[in-house]
Image: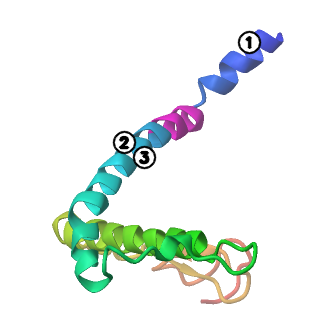
């Protein structure tokens, strides 16, 4: 098999295409989340943290503590928004009905641990009495 054929087979695998679609959709969704956080959540945060404090510029020696703190706070806010919107809010609409459990038609042999029909009195694998 030539390298061209191997590469074509690799690209055409379902999981590679699924991953590519997930990256594109994830990127677009990331823009929506960022716009939501910047436009709706951060203005609410300014009521708690005053906007004129430059805490993102804090430094201790050569360490830029403020930028790490800012990135951490931004991550936590975005993670909270995603959790609330996707898991809690949309999760209520996406709940699936419980699938009724189907009664099992087999049981396990205690001697050899093979599956045998429920009505069997002897195991067909080891012939032990059930």
Is 18 included in the stretch rendered in magenta? yes
Neighbours of disc 1 within 10 Å: few (<14), some (14-19), many (20+)? few
Which of the two residues, 80 or 38, is positioned nearer the viewer here? Answer: 38
The residue to which callout 3 is attached is: 26
- Region in magenta: 14-21
Distance from the alpha carbon under mark 1 to that under mark 3: 30 Å
Q: Quadrant of the C terminus?
A: bottom right
CA gap between label 3 and label 2 equals 5 Å
Q: Residue at x 68, y 26 (%)?
A: 10
Q: Is residue 38 above or below residue 14?
A: below
Label 1 SS: helix
Tell whether position 109 is magenta.
no
Coordinates of residue 59 in the picture (x, y in percent):
64, 76
First in sequence: mark 2 or mark 1?
Answer: 1
Q: Earlier in the sequence, mark 1 or mark 3?
A: 1
Give the residue at x 23% y 69%. Answer: 43
**Residue 2 percent coordinates (x, y):** 83, 10
Which residue is more in the foreground, 50 or 112?
Answer: 50
Residue 94, given in percent of the width and then of the height, sits at 22, 64
The nearer-to-camera label among 1 and 3 is: 3
Q: Main secondary structure of the magenta part?
A: helix
> Which residue does the numbered mark 1 point to in the structure image?
5
In the foreground, 47 or 37: 47
């Amino acid at each position: 098999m030539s390298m061209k054929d191997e590469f074509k087979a690799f690209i055409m695998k379902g999981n590679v295409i699924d991953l590519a679609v997930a990256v594109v959709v994830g990127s677009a969704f990331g823009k929506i989340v960022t716009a939501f956080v910047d436009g709706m959540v951060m203005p609410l945060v300014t009521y708690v943290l005053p906007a004129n404090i430059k805490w993102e510029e804090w430094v201790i020696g050569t360490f830029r503590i403020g930028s790490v703190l800012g990135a951490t706070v931004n991550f936590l806010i975005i993670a909270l928004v995603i959790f609330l919107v996707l898991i809690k809010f949309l999760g209520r609409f996406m709940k699936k009905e419980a699938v009724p459990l189907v009664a099992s038609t087999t049981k396990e042999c205690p001697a050899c641990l093979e599956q045998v029909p429920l009505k069997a009195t002897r195991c067909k694998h080891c012939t032990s009495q059930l």
